[in-house]
Image (cartoon, rainbow, N blue to C red):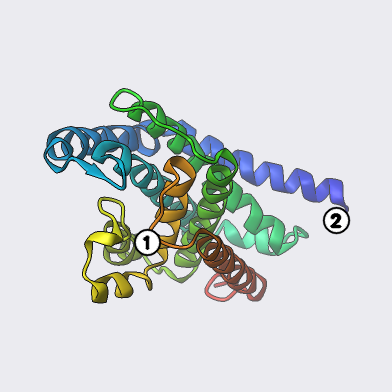
């Protein structure tokens, strides 16, 4: 395939992914807005008024970046894992594998769909947050970089989960038993400075800590970890996840019947 044909193939896959989640927006976009509104009310207004300030900001301002990032993580992941497993389940993915489309184009098309949903949900959640608090932006460039890298990373992880899943129940195992605990323990609702030294050190092994902290620094200018190290960790995870996803796609492991 020449470059134009590859571009057409990429855009076709991406448009298919976007149309898929827009067609069922009440299941893919609306729940995040409702869930985050509840978080804002409960943790921001009700509990936050009792906690006071954290990191030099009101508790509401402190948790909003973490909640936005949580929405990006869950939606980017969910979009790719559900869509690609569906293609695998009904065997339509085999048509892609035998086509002349390069594997990296297929992978990038699905990832782009997940990234678009993650960013769209982030915009919705951010707009909702403005009804509850002001939202300063300390470094717009860093915000864009972290959002892009995070949505790419978790789209790739969703792809890997879809490849190894055998049933629709399997695509919920990782989000339920791995992703959700790591998110809640990733500093979304608290600063690592509040933890004892031992647990603060243990938290450094949680990759979501770097994602949340880097995004919070972009929004508020405060962070629990070194920003350069956090970005490096996220970028490294993206490269590893992309390489492994591409390997799975090229070999057709668990994809061909």
Q: Nearer the viewer, residue 256 or 82?
A: 82
Q: Work out whether mark 1 precedes mark 2 in sequence or the reverse, and give the earlier one.
A: 2
Residue at 51 percent of width and 58 percent of height: 227
Q: Quadrant of the C terminus?
A: bottom right
Q: Position of residue 107 (x, y in %)?
A: 63, 58
- Furthest toward the right, the residue is 2
Distance of mark 1 from mark 2, alpha carbons? 33 Å
- Furthest toward the front, the residue is 56
Q: Position of residue 68 (x, y in %)?
A: 38, 42
Task: List the residue tagged with mark 1.
Answer: 171
Task: List the residue tagged with mark 2.
Answer: 1
Residue 101 vertical placement versus 219 (above, below): below
Q: Quadrant of the N terminus?
A: bottom right
Residue at 38 percent of width and 51 percent of height: 74
- Residue 58 location, quadrant: top left
Per the image, label 2 sits on a secondary structure element best described as loop
Q: Position of residue 76 (x, y in %)?
A: 47, 49
Dot 2: within a 10 Å radius of its alpha carbon, few (fewer than 14), some, or many (20 or more) residues? few
Q: Position of residue 113 (x, y in %)?
A: 56, 45
Q: How many marks?
A: 2
- Residue 48 location, quadrant: top left
């Amino acid at each position: 395939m020449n470059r134009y044909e590859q571009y057409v193939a990429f855009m076709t896959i991406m448009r298919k992914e976007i149309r898929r989640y827009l067609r069922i927006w009440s299941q893919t976009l609306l729940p995040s807005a409702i869930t985050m509104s509840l978080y804002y009310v409960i943790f921001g207004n009700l509990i936050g008024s009792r906690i006071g300030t954290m990191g030099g900001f009101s508790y509401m301002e402190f948790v909003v970046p973490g909640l936005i990032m949580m929405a990006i993580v869950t939606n980017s992941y969910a979009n790719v894992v559900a869509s690609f497993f569906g293609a695998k389940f009904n065997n339509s993915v085999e048509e892609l594998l035998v086509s002349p489309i390069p594997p990296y184009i297929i992978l990038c098309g699905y990832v782009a769909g997940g990234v678009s949903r993650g960013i769209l949900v982030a915009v919705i959640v951010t707009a909702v947050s403005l009804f509850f608090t002001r939202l300063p932006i300390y470094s717009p460039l860093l915000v864009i970089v972290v959002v892009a890298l995070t949505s790419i990373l978790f789209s790739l992880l969703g792809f890997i989960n879809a490849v190894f899943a055998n049933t629709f129940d399997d695509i919920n195992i990782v989000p339920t038993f791995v992703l959700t605990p790591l998110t809640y323990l990733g500093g979304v609702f608290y600063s690592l400075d509040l933890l004892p030294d031992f647990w603060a050190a243990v938290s450094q092994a949680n990759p979501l800590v770097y994602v949340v902290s880097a995004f919070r620094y972009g929004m508020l200018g405060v962070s629990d970890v070194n920003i350069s190290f956090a970005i490096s960790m996220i970028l490294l995870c993206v490269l590893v996840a992309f390489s492994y996803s591409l390997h799975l796609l090229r070999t057709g492991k668990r994809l061909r019947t």
